[in-house]
Image (cartoon, rainbow, N blue to C red):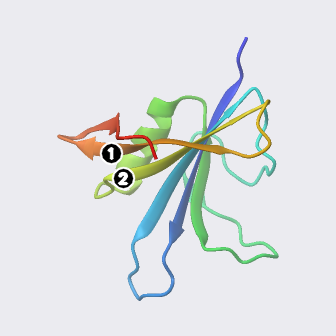
């Protein structure tokens, strides 16, 4: 049985007032995320920690569809999501094809 967690992380460009957000989804396959600060099943404001990162919103989801639905609800203007895959065999997360929105549906774009 395969275990999957889809972590959504939203960061904001703080170099400009009203800077755009960047959205990333990391699929953790057969491994747990290293940090456990994200909420399950919904997007919430990220906890500010020692590092005071640009991370503003985060959440863990059981399926990719649920993660995309949460992104659409919170950021309807989003049109691009960077994607990563992090398996038990990987030392670091691997970048995979991003998702782009076309005609209201998310689909993979050309590989990075």
Q: Nearer the viewer, residue 42 or 104?
A: 104
- Name the residue: 80% across, 42% down: 91
Q: Residues within 10 Å of mark 2 (few under 14, many from 20)?
A: some
Residue 88: quarter of image:
top right
Calculate the distance from the C-alpha at mark 2 to the C-alpha at mark 1.
5 Å
Residue 11: quarter of image:
bottom right
The residue pinned by badge 1 equals 100
| 101, above or below 23, in the image | above
- Name the residue: 76% across, 43% down: 33
| 62, above or below 44, in the image | above
Which residue of the protein is positioned furthest toward the left in this rendering? 103
Place of residue 108 in the rendered image (x, y in percent of width and height, measured from the top left): 37, 36
The residue pinned by badge 2 equals 80
Left or right: 44 in relation to 48:
left
Residue 5: quarter of image:
top right
Q: Residues within 10 Å of mark 1 (few under 14, many from 20)?
A: some
Place of residue 74 in the rendered image (x, y in percent of width and height, measured from the top left): 40, 55
Q: Which quadrant of the rendered structure holds the N terminus?
A: top right
| 18, above or below 8, in the image | below
Place of residue 9 in the rendered image (x, y in percent of width and height, measured from the top left): 57, 55
Judged from the image, the secondary structure of the residue bearing numbered disc 1 is strand
Judged from the image, the secondary structure of the residue bearing numbered disc 2 is strand
Q: Nearer the viewer, residue 60 or 95?
A: 95
Q: Nearer the viewer, residue 100 or 9?
A: 100
CB of mark 2 within 8 Å of CB of mark 1? yes
Place of residue 58 in the rendered image (x, y in percent of width and height, measured from the top left): 60, 55
Q: Nearer the viewer, residue 83 or 8?
A: 83
Q: Earlier in the sequence, mark 2 or mark 1?
A: 2
- Name the residue: 60% across, 49% down: 59
């Amino acid at each position: 049985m395969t275990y999957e967690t889809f972590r959504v992380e939203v960061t904001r460009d703080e170099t400009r007032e009203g800077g755009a957000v960047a959205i990333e989804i990391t699929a953790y396959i057969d491994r747990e995320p290293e940090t456990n600060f994200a909420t399950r099943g919904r997007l919430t404001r990220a906890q500010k920690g020692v590092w005071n990162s640009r991370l503003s919103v985060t959440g863990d989801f059981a399926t990719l569809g649920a993660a995309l639905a949460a992104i659409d609800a919170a950021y309807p203007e989003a049109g691009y999501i960077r994607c990563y895959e992090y398996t038990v065999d990987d030392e670091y997360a691997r970048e995979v094809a991003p998702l782009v929105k076309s005609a209201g549906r998310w689909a993979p774009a050309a590989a990075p």
